[in-house]
Image (cartoon, rainbow, N blue to C red):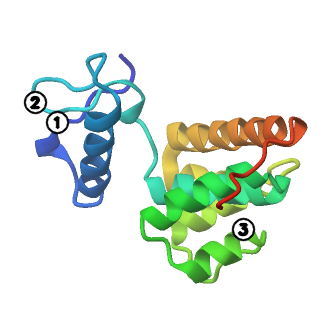
Amino acid sequence: MRLPLISPSELTPEQQPLYDDMRKGIASNFNAFVSQREDGALMGPWNPWLPDNVRQIAILVVGARFDAAYELYAHIAVAEAEGMPLERLATLVADLKPSDLNKEESVAYALCRGGLLPEPIYRLALATFGQKGTNELIYLVGLYSMVSTTLNGFDVPVPAHA
């Protein structure tokens, strides 16, 4: 194993809310397989994930760049449920950078610009997230670029009530 599991007793104050949120989602959606060690350490894809606010910034920016209606619809709902302020959400989906992003969120926003990633942004991402976190964020942007392209290619509609 390249990334050791984190026991709940070893979580930092920043990690604890993400851990609690993940455990709640895991308990309600992923009961067919083992996803936690006996001490509560998360197993599977949850252990290495970036903080959700950073992930949601990246996903919303990619969705806005591709004008992927369903992706925006789905992740607006997620962001609202997580308490993202309406002004920030509206700015992101307008493909603009909100003025209230923290350092990690700003780096995530910068990584989503498209085209060749400038060296200073890459180095800043490494300094902010480390190599593994930077890799994860780049993969996340690539994944949601593919999702956006797929949704747009098949003209996936947003539900009528949305």
- 88 or 6, nearer to the observer: 88
Instruction: Specify few, some or many for label 1: CA neighbours under 10 Å numbering under 14, 14-19, or 20 or more.
Output: some
Q: Position of residue 102 (x, y in %)?
A: 51, 73
Q: Is residue 79 left or right of residue 106?
A: left
Mark 2 lies on residue: 39
Q: Position of residue 1 (x, y in %)?
A: 35, 16
Q: Are marks 1 and 3 in contact (CB under 8 Å)?
A: no
Q: Closer to the N terminus: mark 1 or mark 3?
A: 1
Residue 84 in the image: above or below residue 30: below
Mark 3 lies on residue: 93
Mark 1 lies on residue: 7
The answer to which image quadrant residue 109 occupies is: bottom right
- 28 or 49, nearer to the observer: 28
Q: Tell me which amino acid carries mark 1.
A: Ser
Q: Closer to the N terminus: mark 2 or mark 3?
A: 2
| Image mark count | 3
Q: Nearer the viewer, mark 2 or mark 3?
A: 3
Q: Secondary structure at mark 3?
A: helix
- 40 or 68, nearer to the observer: 68
Residue 43 in the image: above or below residue 158: above
Q: Are marks 2 and 1 in contact (CB under 8 Å)?
A: yes
Q: Tell me which amino acid carries mark 2.
A: Asp
Instruction: Specify few, some or many for label 3: CA neighbours under 10 Å numbering under 14, 14-19, or 20 or more.
Output: many
Q: Closer to the N terminus: mark 2 or mark 1?
A: 1
Residue 3 in the image: above or below residue 128: above
**Point 69% across, 70% down: residue:** 92
Residue farthest front in this picture = 160
Q: Tell me which amino acid carries mark 3.
A: Val
**Point 29% across, 53% down: residue:** 15
Rounded to the nearest whole Å, what is the CA distance between mark 2 and mark 1? Answer: 6 Å
**Point 60% across, 77% down: residue:** 88
